[in-house]
Amino acid sequence: MNVRTKPKTFGPVFAFFDGSETPRYASDPASEKSLHPPVGTPVDMLLASLAYCIVKSVEWAAKDHKSYLHSFAVKVTGTKALDLPGRVEKMEVTIIGDLVDDSAVAGQIVKLAKSICTVSNTLNCAVLISTEPAADD
């Protein structure tokens, strides 16, 4: 018997870095930001943990590169596997904003952050990281 589940996505969960010690969270960029992740499923909490870890890892990587970070956001979504057992098959992380003035250094920071993020390194699913510029307001 081959059991297949319906395609499902989780999130997004956003974590925002503005230079303060603790990131703020929201379920979309326009929502009010909170010190606590948005209430949702256990998977949403997992997405929030990954978002937080990426923010902190970017901070550490920037410090290693002696770079000053601009404000940025991390968006994380998850995609459920189509077969059993129930699990997240893929998490997509998007770092939104220009991390630093030099785009080459920014790329190095992202690469280092991915390699030192304990949460992404612990997960048993694909973790894909991309970047995009901040939306013009």
Image (cartoon, grey):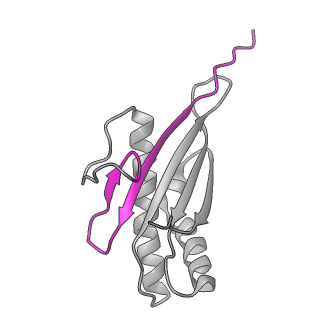
Q: Residue furthest front?
A: 137
Judging depth in this view, the residue of 66 and 29 nearest the camera is 29
- Queried whether the magenta region covers residue 11, the answer comes back as yes
Q: Which corner quadrant of the image does residue 121 belong to?
A: bottom right
The relative height of residue 58 versus residue 100 in the rendered view (above or below) is above
Q: Residue furthest bottom?
A: 66
In the rendered image, the quadrant that contains the C terminus is bottom left
The relative height of residue 17 versus residue 15 in the rendered view (above or below) is below
Give percent across and percent down for residue 21: 26, 70
Give percent across and percent down for residue 15: 39, 57
The relative height of residue 66 versus residue 99 in the rendered view (above or below) is below
Give percent across and percent down for residue 112: 56, 74
Judging depth in this view, the residue of 81 and 24 nearest the camera is 24
Judging depth in this view, the residue of 95 and 88 nearest the camera is 95
Q: Residue furthest right?
A: 1
Residue under the point 50% across and 50% down:
76
Question: In the image, 18: left or right of 101?
Answer: left
Judging depth in this view, the residue of 128 and 122 nearest the camera is 128
Q: Which corner quadrant of the image does residue 103 belong to?
A: bottom right
Q: How many marks?
A: 0
Q: Which residues are magenta?
A: 1-29
